Image (spheres, grey):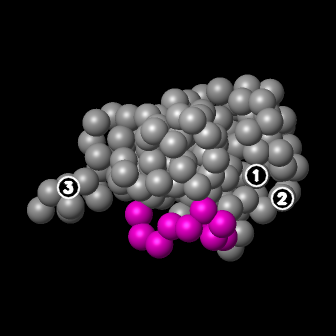
Amino acid sequence: MKHAVALGCVLLLSAVMGAAQSNEALDDILQSVQASYGQAAYLLLTSDGSIEEHSSYEHAAAELQRRLGPVVERHAADALTLGEFALLVQMYHDLPRGLMGRLVRAPRYAVRDLRFLRVVQGRSYPNMRLSGERMVRIMGRVLAWQEGVL
């Protein structure tokens, strides 16, 4: 029962997050088999209203690079792994880190930390391909975790 309520809350938060973003951009992200750095930057920055919903992926990538520095050096169209996305999420939302995550900013430890927070679920290898759908689900869980629902 608890899992059903938590899943419902995550889906509700994902829907709210999606309503704040351009439908075309969200459809594009959900349909991508391989998520890009620009799409990840767009999701991160629109989740808290830092950029307009009609911004391009290139603008979002440049803005995220400006805010976080060279955490993940990629161009907007470059593919992103689960570990790289986990590191971006962890740094952008200032999520708690474990011992190794505090010592070394690495995708491997970011995935471990987000698994501990139950934000990343299922198979989770730092170098695995990340789909747009999984990226949106992870963002929904991040928002749920920040709200204390997860």
In the image, taking residue 72 as reference, residue 20 lies left or right, namely left
Residue type for callout 3: Val
- The residue that disc 3 covers is 5
Q: Is residue 78 magenta?
A: no
The residue segment tinted magenta is: 121-132
Please report whichever mark, 2 or 1, sits nearer to the chain's N-terminal start: 1
Please report whichever mark, 2 or 3, sits nearer to the chain's N-terminal start: 3
Residue type for callout 2: Asp
- The residue that disc 1 covers is 37
Mark 2 and mark 1 in contact? Answer it, CB < 8 Å. yes
Q: CA distance from mark 1 to mark 3?
A: 32 Å
Q: Residue at x 36, y 41 (%)?
A: 145
Q: Nearer the viewer, residue 93 or 19?
A: 93
Q: Nearer the viewer, residue 48 or 54?
A: 48
Q: Is residue 11 above or below residue 91?
A: below
- The residue that disc 2 covers is 78
| Disc 1 secondary structure class | helix
Please name which of the two marks, 2 or 3, marks the residue nearer to the observer.
2
Q: Residue at x 44, y 40 (%)?
A: 98
Furthest toward the left, the residue is 1
| Disc 2 secondary structure class | loop
